[in-house]
Image: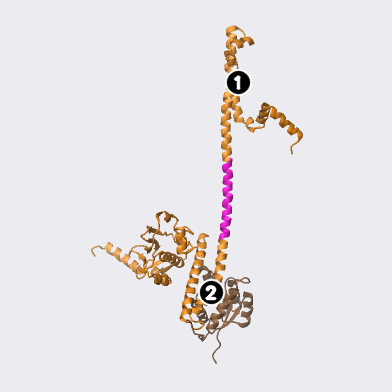
Amino acid sequence: MLPEQPLILVVDDESDSLAYLFDLLHNEGYRVLPTPSALEALAQIAKRKPQLVISDLRMPDLDGLELLDRVKRDSPQTRVLLLTAYGTRAMSEDVLRRGGEAMLIKPSTSGEILRAVRRALEGAGAIPEPNGRGDR
Amino acid sequence: MVTRRQSALAASLDRRPALRSILQALRDPHTYDLRRNSFTLFGLIWGLPLSLFSIAIDLWVIGHPLRQEQFWREPIHLVFLLHPILFGIIFGAVGTVYSKQDRQIAELLDEQRRHLEELASANREMKKIDELKSQFMANVTHELKTPLVSIKGYNEAILEGRFGPLTAQQRHGLAVAVRNVGRLENMILELLEFDRIESHSYLPRMTDFDLVALIRLVLTNFQPQVDEKQLAIELRLPPRLEVRADYEGIRRVLLNLLSNALKFSGKGGAIGVEVQAGPDSPQADVTVWDRGPGIPEEAKRFLFTRFWQADGSSRRRHGGTGLGLAIVKGILDAHGSTADLDSAPGSGTRIRFRLPRVPTPASLQESAYASGTAAHPRG
């Protein structure tokens, strides 16, 4: 039997953006757990221990950076990738300093997102190549 | 409310205009004006010696002051005696003129002060509105960008064939959609960038990078438009050139300048990019040019101001936010550089700016060699 695919938790309060990320990653063969709010995400992270969390930066209940801090505190082995509609380079440096993998500026191309995901998972010491069609 | 007594008084005043004007004069603060009254008093005192002198002469010549009937026989004595009143009237008139002028000046100053206060409060209001506008821009831009994430993401993923194979027609249709989402995204980014420059929160982050590679990268963004308009791109670039500047900022400058050059070029025209840097020059000269309609003289002054396009019809023909060059100026200003414009109607447009170079090991060696030969000219 093939080893289990890595689990990616995606959190975005914007349901269509969430659906897009889910479809994109699911299509690549990853196991994806979509959550519509940061607090729910924290509960799920504690329970399911995903290898990677992809989070929006601006969310009503909890800021993406705060989520990053909590994830790094509670389950430091989990990698975190942030997505934002507008960010500066200073912000992305802040993300790296807090232990995040990277900050992607939305809208990023699907290729960019998948590349960042693959790099983050490689860093996590995971993991077999996804069995989807792959990125280009 | 008008009482009966007041209306009776008003009626009696109507019948006696002299009394009314006296009452009015008593009410007028001008009557008690110190400056005006001092002139009158001075006139009275000034006239006094003349009348005293005339009485003294009478005493000396005829032994006693003139009697009443003698005054009427020789009226000149009356004139002498009334001199203090005469001078009082003359000086009083002068004082009246002066004090009136004073009052007018005071009124003007008062008005001026009122206007200033009005202006200051209008200015405060404007600043408040400007802050609101910036806040609004930031919010709206974020809101505009959010739906783009799923629109652009899905369209691109489908176009890339991630969700299954496409027919040629589907691929073409999606490619058009993706290109136009890209345009929309670019305009939103422009608004965001402009807002950052306007609110002075844009700070260039200086790094060393290869300017030539950046120019080539930016040019690839425009390939579809270049193909569509069948434009010739003329490049005069060195193989590579390191500059010290804000990578994202200069990318935006090049994007905006090239986008303008393309926008204003007709089918089959030409645009160009030139980078010049002498071996010893600490600066790189970057020029972006087109052979479009050019910019009329009277328009040059406004070219780098926001929302402005050469004429109203131009906005309809060429589209765009009208912020492109204002952003270019903002970014270059923050670098301590400027955009130099060289354009005339009918002969195209050249925009040039300078960026500081990074001293390369090669140029360091060159200068070391140059100083070496200078030290030993015959060696």
Mark 1 crowdedness (10 Å alpha carbons): few <14, some 14-19, many ≥20: some
Find residue B275 and name its label: none
Q: Is residue B30 left or right of residue B174?
A: right
Image mark 1: chain:
B
Q: Are marks 1 and 2 in contact (CB under 8 Å)?
A: no
Q: Quadrant of residue A68?
A: bottom right
* Chain assignment, label 2: B
Specify the chain shown as brown. A
- B191 up-or-down from B14: above or below: below
Estimate the x, y position of residue B211 in percent, counting from the top left. 40, 68
Give the residue pinned by disc 2: B151
User: Quadrant location of the N terminus of chain B?
Assistant: top right
The residue that label 1 is drawn on is B85
Identify which residue is drawn at 60% across, 12% down.
Answer: B55
Q: Which of the two discs, 1 and 2, labels the residue nearer the N terminus?
A: 1
Nearest the viewer among B189 and A95 is B189
Comparing labels 1 and 2, the label whose residue is closer to the camera = 2
In the figure, what tint was chain B given?
Answer: orange
Furthest residue in direction bottom, as rendered: A1
Q: Which residues are magenta?
A: B110-133
| Residue B225 drawn at (x, y percent) | 42, 70
Q: What's the amino acid at mark 1?
A: Ile
Q: Amino acid at mark 2?
A: Ile
Q: Is residue B296 at least partly visible in the picture?
A: yes
> Magenta span has B118?
yes
Q: Distance between the Cα atoms at labels 1 and 2? A: 97 Å
In magenta stretch: residue B336: no
Q: What percent of the width, then of the height, locates residue B127?
A: 56, 55
Q: What secondary structure is marked by label 2?
A: helix
**B30 vs B355, nearest the viewer:** B30
